[in-house]
Image (spheres, rainbow, N blue to C red):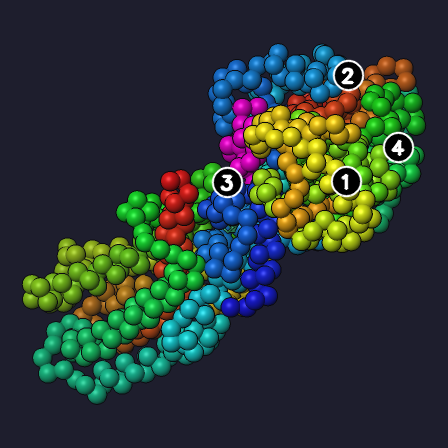
Amino acid sequence: MSADTIQEARRQIEICNACRYCEGYCAVFPAITRQKAFADGDITQLANLCHNCRGCYYACQYTEPHEFALNLPKVLAEVRQDSWQDFAWPPQFGKVFHKSGVAITMLIVLCFSLFFGLSRLVMPANGDGFYATLSHSMMVAVFAPAFLLPLVSIAISLRRYWQFVGGGRLTVAAVKSAFANVGRMKNLSGGHGEGCNFEDEDRFTKLRKIGHQLTMWGFLLCFMATSSGTILHYGFDIKAPYSLISAPKLFGVTGGIMLTFGTIKLAWLKTKADRKLGDGRVWGGEMAFVLLLCAVAVTGLLLYAVTGTVLVPMLLAVHLGTVLTLFLLMPFSKMAHGFYRLAALLQDERKVNNDSR
Amino acid sequence: MKNEPDLVIVGGGNAALCAAITAAHAGVRVLILEGAPKDYRGGNSRHTRNFRCMHDGPLSVLTGSYGEDEYYDDLLRVTKGNTDETLARLAIRGSQDSQPWMEAHGVRFQPSLSGTLSLSRTNAFFLGGGKALVNAYYRTAERLGAQVLYDAPVTHLELTQDKITRVDYTYQGENLTLSPKAVVVASGGFQANIERLVAAWGPEAENFLIRGTPYNRGDVLFDLLDQGVQSIGDPTQCHAVAIDGRAPKFDGGIVTRLDCVPFSVVVNKHAKRFYNEGEDVWPKRYAIWGRLVAAQDDQVAYSIIDRKSKDLFMPSVFPPITADNIGELATKLGLDVSTLERTVADFNAACQPGEFHPTELDGVTTDALNPPKTNWARPIEDGPFYAYELRPGVTFTYLGFKVDETAQVQGPNGAIRNLWAAGETMAGSILGQGYLAGFGMTIGTVFGRIAGREAADYVR
Ligand SMILES: Cc1cc2nc3c(=O)[nH]c(=O)nc-3n(C[C@H](O)[C@H](O)[C@H](O)COP(=O)(O)OP(=O)(O)OC[C@H]3O[C@@H](n4cnc5c(N)ncnc54)[C@H](O)[C@@H]3O)c2cc1C
Ligand code: SF4
Ligand code: SF4
C-alpha cells in the first residue's frame, strides 16, 4: 500500500476527529471518533467503510483552496483501491486489472473468440435450445472453474483484509445489522434519508442509491436465475429452455431488466460526477465494469427475446463471453467492492458492539 | 444586470440567506452580493455547528424543554445584563418557529455531536455543520429566483436623507452601481480587518488569529457609521478565545480549539503562571482565556500537561510538542529551562490530595500558590510531557448597527426607510458582551427573516 496515501488519509482523518461536523453522514465518522490514533489497518478499514457519497466533501469548510485541503472521499477512495490491489490474489493480476478498462475490454474480446471458436468446433450431437449451440457439459467445463476460482481468490483476499484491519470473531447480531446496512444501503442515504451528493455538486438526490440498488438486486436476481436453473437441471432433471413461468426465467428477466436500468443509470451519473472526488486512476476501469454488467444484462435479455431464431448462436456467444469475463474479473474489478464493503461493515459492527459492552 | 433587483442583500452568510429566502418567497427580485468567492461563501456561518433554540417541549432533535425565561436568564448571565430585553426576547421567541422554517428550507439537524452532550437540550446541531446549512440555503434561494454574485464586495451605500439611494460594489474588477428599492446589510463584523483591530485594541491585536472568514472587514459597517448611522456595542471589544497558536491566520475554524487548559498549567513566555486554570468547567471559562492570553507579552502562552491528562479532552488538530522531561520541553518551547522547572515544581508541591473528576468541579486544589488552581490540580510529573501553544483567536467584534424590533437601521435622524440589518452586524444590540453558544446563528436567523419580511413589505 502506498505509505504516502495512507499518511495523507491519516492527516485528514485527524482533522476530522478534531471537527466531527460530518458525524451524521455515515459510519466512517463515528468510527473515527472512537479512536485517537490510527494505524494503517484502521485507515484501511475506514476507507472500505466509505461509500464515496461525498457529503463530507461538500459540507467541509476546509476543502481547497483552504490550506487544510480536505478531500476525504478522494483520499479514502485511493486507500481503498490500493488495498484491493494489494490484497488481490494472485497479486500480479491485481495490478493489471485494477487500473485499466482497456484490459477488461480486451479480455472480453478474447472470450468472445474463444466462444465462437468453441461453438463451431464442438458441435453437440443432441441438444435443444442453447445446447444446440454449445453442449451443456462444455458450458460446465468452462464455467465451473471460471466461477469457483475467483471465489477462492476473493476468499483469500478477504482473509488478508480481515487480518490487516484486526478483525476477529463475529457475533450473530453484528452479521445481522451489517447485512441490514447493505440491504438498505444506509451509507448512501446521507444520514437524513435524502440520498447522497454525486451528480450535481451539493444537491442530495437518491438517484445513485436507486441506480445502485437496481444494479445490486438485479445482479442477485440474475444470479438466482442461474442457481435455480442449476438446481432444476441437476436436482430435478428439468432442462433449459425454461418457460416464462419458471424460477430461472422469472428471476432472470426481472433481474436482467433491473440490472440494465441500474447500470445505465450508474454509468450516466458517473459521467456527471466530479472526478476529483474519487480515485481518478481507476475511473476508466470502473466505467468499463459498469458497462460490462450492463452488457451481461442486455445480451441476456436479448438472448431470451430471439429464442428460436438464427441469432441465438451469436448472441449466446456474446452473452456467455460477457458473463465469463465478469466472473473471471470478479476479484480484480470493481466487483470486489461488494465483498470488501461487507467485510468492513462487519468489522465496524464488531467494534460498535465491543465498545458498547 | 438584466433584471434590476428590488432588494440588494449585502453579504452571503446565514443572516443574508435567511433574508434573501424570505424576500424571494414574497415574490421580490433579490440580488445577493457576496464579497467572498464561491469557495469561501458563507462567512463565519460556514464554521458553525448549531443554533440555540427555545422549545416548550421536545422539538426535532432537541430533548426536554428550554423556555423563554431560562434562555433569557442564560443570556443575562453571560452578558452581565448588557443586552436589549425587547430585541433579546424577540430573538429567543423567534428561535422556536425558526427551527421548522430552517428544516423547510433545506437545513437538516442531528443530535448533538459526540463530546457536546451538555448542549443536547439547548442547541440543535446542523447535519454536516454550517457549510451544509449555507449550501442548502443557496440552493433554496436560487430556486426561489434570487440571484447571487460572488466576489462582489460592496464598497459604499449612499445615504441621502433617510434613504439609501445607491449601492456601489465591485465585480470582476469593475466598479458597478445599483439603485435598488431596499437594502439589507448582513455582512458580519470587522474582525478580519487587522488595522481596525489594532486601532481599537492596541498593537497586541497584530498577533491575534482570526477564527473565521477573512472577508468580514466591516467595510459597509464603517462606511455607514461614517455617514452618521447610529451604532451600538463597544467598538474596542471583540470576543476572543484561546486557540492553538499554530492555527492559520484566518479561517482555522473549530478544529483549532484546545480543551486542555483545565488539566494543565498555563505559563507565559517568561515561563510563569498567570491565572487559575481550574476556575470552572471549560465551556464556561473558554471565552476568558482569549483575553488572558492577549494580555501576556507577545500574546502567547503554553498549556502543559503530562501523560495522565493526554486523553481527557477532544483531540486537537495539531500534535502537541512532546518531551521526556520539563527541561527538554522548555527548550523545545524556547522558554527559560530553570524558570519552567521551578514553576512546575512549585505547582506540583502545592497540589493537595483529592479525588480527581475530569468532568465536574472536583475541588482538587493547590495550597498556598499564587495564582491558585482550584480544581483538577494534579501534579505534572508523569512523562512524557506535552505542550500546546495558545494564542488569542477572535470570533467576532461587538460593534454594530443600532436597529429596532423590525431590524430597521437607525440613521442620524431616526429610521432609515429602506435599510435593514441582520446577523453579526447588528448583534451588539443583544450581545453587549460575552457569548452564549449557538446564539449567533439564532440572531442571524431570526433577524434575517424579519429583515427579509420588512424589506419585502416595503418594496411591494
Ligand atoms: C469558528 C467559529 C465557530 C462558530 N460556531 C458557532 C456555532 O456553532 N453557533 C453559532 O450560533 N455561532 C457560531 N459562531 C458565530 C457565528 O459564526 C456568527 O454569529 C454567524 O455566522 C453570523 O452570521 P452572519 O450572517 O451575520 O455573518 P457571516 O456568516 O460572517 O456572513 C457575513 C457575510 O458577509 C460577506 N461580506 C463581508 N463584507 C462584505 C462586503 N463588503 N460586501 C459583500 N459581502 C460582504 C462575507 O463574505 C460573508 O458572506 C462561530 C464562529 C466561528 C468563527
Ligand atoms: S470532512 Fe471537513 S467538515 Fe467533515 S468532519 Fe472532516 S474536517 Fe469536519
Ligand atoms: S464520502 Fe460519504 S461515506 Fe465517505 S466518508 Fe464522506 S460522508 Fe462518509
Q: Do the residues marked 2 and 1 share a common chain?
A: yes
Badge 1 amino acid: Thr
**Residue under label 3:** A24
Q: Position of residue B305 (x, y in %)?
A: 66, 43
Task: Classify mark 2: helix, strand or loop.
Answer: loop
**Residue B227 on the magenta span:** no
Looking at the figure, which quarter contains the C terminus of chain B?
top right
**Residue under label 2:** B82
Q: Position of residue B445 (x, y in %)?
A: 65, 26
Q: Position of residue B59 (x, y in %)?
A: 50, 22
Image marks 2 and 1: residues in contact by CB distance under 8 Å: no
**Residue B108 on the magenta span:** yes
Lower sequence index among marks 1 and 4: 4
Which one is in front, B81 or B110?
B81
Label 2 chain ID: B
Q: CA distance from mark 1 to mark 3?
A: 44 Å
Q: CA distance from mark 1 to mark 4?
A: 30 Å
Task: Classify mark 3: helix, strand or loop.
Answer: loop
**Residue under label 1:** B343
Label 3 chain ID: A
Which one is in front, B209 or A66?
B209
